[in-house]
Image (tube, grey):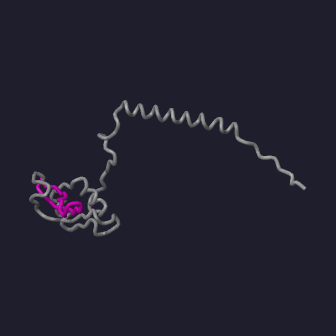
């Protein structure tokens, strides 16, 4: 099975990625079939050179059944070369368990009640408008 994925290059603390088409069984930085683009995370996100593709070759490999990785699919969608990808910023694995979620809800409800209780006496004890003072002659 063919995969479109990134291979890491560059030096320590200065990554640079090639976007390649490779057999899915080959190692991440190992043998690949063709280099079709590049990704430089050191550039600002607005920079057009941050992600580059050979559009013609991307379309060719997509027609031949190459499956993009999640990150490459996101780049392709941004470049209008592939379908939009649903991206979960917070995966379900990292969500708190049921008891922790229940405890969070209880703490939020308690904090809301405390805020209402603190606001109620403050509204009742609101100072009235000050009386006008007469100038001393």
Percent from the top left, x then y, of residue 71?
25, 55
Foreground: 51 or 119? 119
Number of dots carrying numbers: 0
| Residue lying at 25% horizontally and 67% vertically, measured from the top left | 52
Q: Residue at x 23, y 66 (%)?
A: 53
User: Residue 10, located in which quarter of the rendered image?
Assistant: bottom left
Q: Residue 114, relative to residue 2: is it above or below?
A: above
Identify which residue is drawn at 29% across, 59% down: 77
Q: In the visual, does 33 lie left or right of 40?
A: left
Q: Which residues are magenta?
A: 1-23
- The rendered magenta stretch, by its main secondary structure, is classed as strand
Q: Quadrant of residue 48?
A: bottom left
Residue 40: where, in percent of width, then height? 25, 64
Identify whether 101 is placed above or below 60.
Answer: above
Q: Residue furthest front?
A: 137
Residue occupying the far right of the picture: 137
Q: Is residue 100 left or right of residue 2?
A: right
Residue 2 shown in magenta: yes
- Position of the C terminus, as image quadrant, is bottom right
Image coordinates of residue 74 in percent, x first then y, are 28, 57
Magenta segment: does it hold 26?
Answer: no
Residue 127 position by quadrant: top right
Residue 6 x/y as whole percent: 19, 58
Query: Residue at (16%, 61%) from the top-left corner?
Result: 20
Q: In the depicted view, which residue is nearer to us: 33 or 13?
A: 13
> Is 22 positioned to the left or the right of 87 in the image?
left
- Above or below, comparing residue 36 to residue 106 in the picture: below
In front of the other: 73 or 114: 114
Question: Looking at this view, is 41 or 70 the one in front?
Answer: 41
């Amino acid at each position: 099975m063919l995969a479109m994925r990134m291979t890491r290059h560059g030096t320590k603390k200065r990554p640079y990625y090639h976007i390649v088409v490779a057999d899915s069984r080959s190692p991440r930085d190992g043998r690949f079939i063709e280099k079709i683009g590049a990704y430089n995370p050191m550039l600002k996100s607005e920079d057009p050179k941050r992600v580059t593709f050979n559009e013609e070759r991307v379309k060719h490999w997509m027609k031949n059944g190459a499956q993009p990785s999640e990150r490459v699919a996101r780049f392709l969608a941004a470049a209008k070369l592939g379908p939009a990808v649903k991206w979960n910023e917070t995966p379900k694995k990292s969500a708190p368990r049921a008891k922790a979620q229940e405890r969070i809800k209880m703490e939020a409800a308690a904090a809301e009640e405390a805020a209402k209780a603190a606001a109620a006496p403050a509204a009742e004890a609101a100072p009235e408008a000050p009386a006008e003072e007469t100038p001393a002659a």
